[in-house]
Amino acid sequence: MPSKLKKIKQWENINFDTIIDVRSPSEYKEDHIIGSINCPVLSDKERIEVGTIYKKESTFRAKIIGSSLTARNIANHIESKFINQKGSWRPLIYCWRGGQRSKSFAIILSEVGWRTYQLDGGYKKYRNNVINYLNKIGSKLKVILISGKTGSAKTKILQNIVSHGGQILDLENLANHKGSLLGKIPGFEQPSQKLFESRLFYELKKLDLRKNIYVEAESSKIGNLHIPKSIWGKMIKSPRIEIKADVKLRSSFLIKDYDYMCNDPELIKPIINGLKNKLSKKLIGEWLVLINENKWFDLTKSFLENHYDPSYSSNTIKNDRKIIKQIEAKTLSDFDINRIAKLIVSQK
């Protein structure tokens, strides 16, 4: 017997086998429930086509064209993605508001006999849940910041904390950006602000809020993305563990960590040119010469001494969070990074 279609509001309470977003690819790219797959009932082009007919010709004709395209696309999705699913398969379907797009898809899957659910309120309901959660969660977090000057391997230390049983929130990973002026990662696009917030929501939901959460000290922006106000408000009041490493050690680490820039110096020049209003022409000129001569250690050391370190000192004064421990890095080798991570987790 075919299963009855179920509409639900509390989608997180059920362990679905597949979450299916039936909106257009551009809507899905902007934001979606993390872990969902995109099976659009109308492509971006088809959606525009149907919308144009609706506005300029007739509502009835738009419905005819839209329903035929929808039926064809749903059939293609079933044949290409779901044809081997067992009768016990339990999908959740959603669209923008929980309207016709998700209803059409969900009815067909339900009639097959699959245990199908439709998200009441759709993406809009989900988005409101994300916003409300992020607006309130900051005060409930037990954040400990990992701070230190640029090049002190904070991100790698943070990631190593997991192997010692600690909880982390890796904001840079969620933002696809290293957080600094040179933080854009080649080949990676930053998510939209909405998708960044969905990623945050998803990660925070996995954490035990009774325990410490280690977070790298950041500015309020990571690349083009803003850390939500409640989380940022908690960060600027949280205690920190400071990693100390001398400028030569940090310079050597950065050359390895940003090796793709050394291999393609053209990535650096536009960023340097963007600093012309902040730094002297003489210094900018010296940097360009060092790039042309492939003197990466000298360039990196000068970057740190003339831009990054003064900026760090200024921000530290503005946000004078309590230092609960200072850890001196003897090296920034994988072994030493792991040693530091272990020390951090053992800090009570």
Image: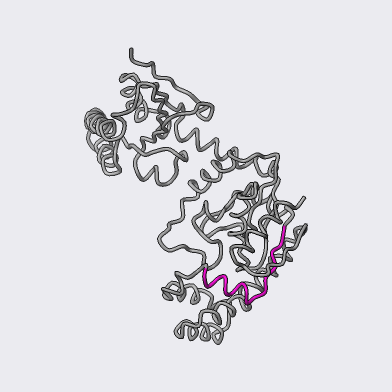
Please check the rendered image and state whether residue 85 is part of the magenta-colored stretch, yes or no: no
Q: At x 56% / y 65%, what residue is drawn?
A: 180
Q: At x 69% / y 64%, what residue is drawn?
A: 243
Residue 42 horizontal/vertical position (percent):
29, 37
User: Quick check: 83 above or below 284?
Assistant: above
Q: Quadrant of residue 47?
A: top left
User: Quick check: 325 above or below 121?
Assistant: below
Q: At x 22% / y 35%, what residue is drawn?
A: 57
Residue 211 horizontal/vertical position (percent):
70, 42
User: Quick check: 68 above or below 114?
Assistant: below
Q: Nearer the viewer, residue 276 or 71?
A: 71
Disc count in the image?
0
Q: At x 52% / y 30%, what residue is drawn?
A: 12
Quadrant that contains the N terminus: top left
- The residue furthest top is 1
- The residue furthest front is 335
Residue 314 horizontal/vertical position (percent):
69, 69
Magenta stretch, overall SS: helix
Q: Which residues are magenta?
A: 241-256
Q: Nearer the viewer, residue 165 or 283?
A: 165
Please check the rendered image and state whether residue 253 is part of the magenta-colored stretch, yes or no: yes
Query: By what rule are the colours in the image chosen?
Result: one colour
Q: Quadrant of residue 266?
A: bottom left
Image position of 208 (left or right of 70): right
Image position of 122 (left or right of 130): left
User: Quick check: 148 above or below 246?
Assistant: above
Residue 51 horizontal/vertical position (percent):
29, 38
Q: Nearer the viewer, residue 80 or 232?
A: 80
